[in-house]
Amino acid sequence: MTFQTEANATAILAGEFVKWKSTGSPYVIPLADADGVIGTITGVVGLAKSDSTQTASVDGTIDVYLPLPGVVYNIKAKTSTLADSASEIAALCGDSVIIDLTGGVYTLDTAAGNAQTSPFTIVGGDVASASLNVILKSGATFLGDQDLS
């Protein structure tokens, strides 16, 4: 789907998660550090398919993949040594974690702990890249429990 981006706002790059700027806003913005906590932010809209097109003075648009049930995302672990073995990844499966944005790079913060209000649930991973497979909880999205079939 195509969404609006606001003039003079932070550029959104393909592959970044986006959320509503605020309740009732027509604009999407990128997730911030530790963002996505269920019940404390506007819903996650999805994953940017393209870069946003806004300029300093003109609103733009961005194409976004919606967070449909069953979609699995792969995101690097913030601390690679916590996800670089099969046993570590297995121990993390089922944990709910938050996104981390440090130095302009999005990762999963597995060290932040398992919290039911965290938006991403770990369902596997890749040892070679120290990355984790996650699903986005429906309660964290702007879609909630809507049936899109």
Image (cartoon, rainbow, N blue to C red):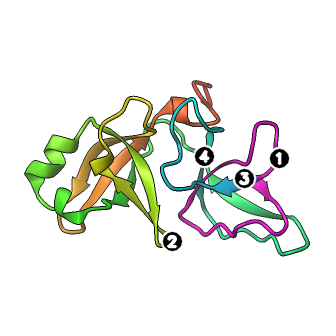
Residue flagged by tag 4: what amino acid is it? Leu
Question: Between disc 2 and disc 4, whose residue precedes?
Answer: 4
Determine the secondary structure under disc 3: strand
| Residue 144 x, y percent position in the rendering | 59, 28
* Discs 1/4, front: 1
* Discs 4/3, front: 3
Q: Does the magenta-highlighted stretch encompass residue 72?
A: no
Q: Does the magenta-highlighted stretch encompass residue 23?
A: yes
Task: From the viewer's side, name the closer residue of 73 and 38.
Answer: 38
Could you say which disc has been placed on residue 66 in the image? 4
The residue positioned 51% from the left and 71% from the top of the image is: 104
- Within-10-Å neighbours for mark 2: few <14, some 14–19, many 20+: few
Locate residue 83 relative to residue 13 in the image: left or right: left
Given the current orientation, which residue lies at the most extreme right position?
57
- Within-10-Å neighbours for mark 3: few <14, some 14–19, many 20+: many
The residue positioned 18% from the left and 50% from the top of the image is: 89
The CA distance from mark 3 to mark 2 is 18 Å
Question: In which quarter of the view is residue 16 placed?
Answer: bottom right
- Identify the magenta region: 1-27
Could you say which disc has been placed on residue 104 in the image? 2
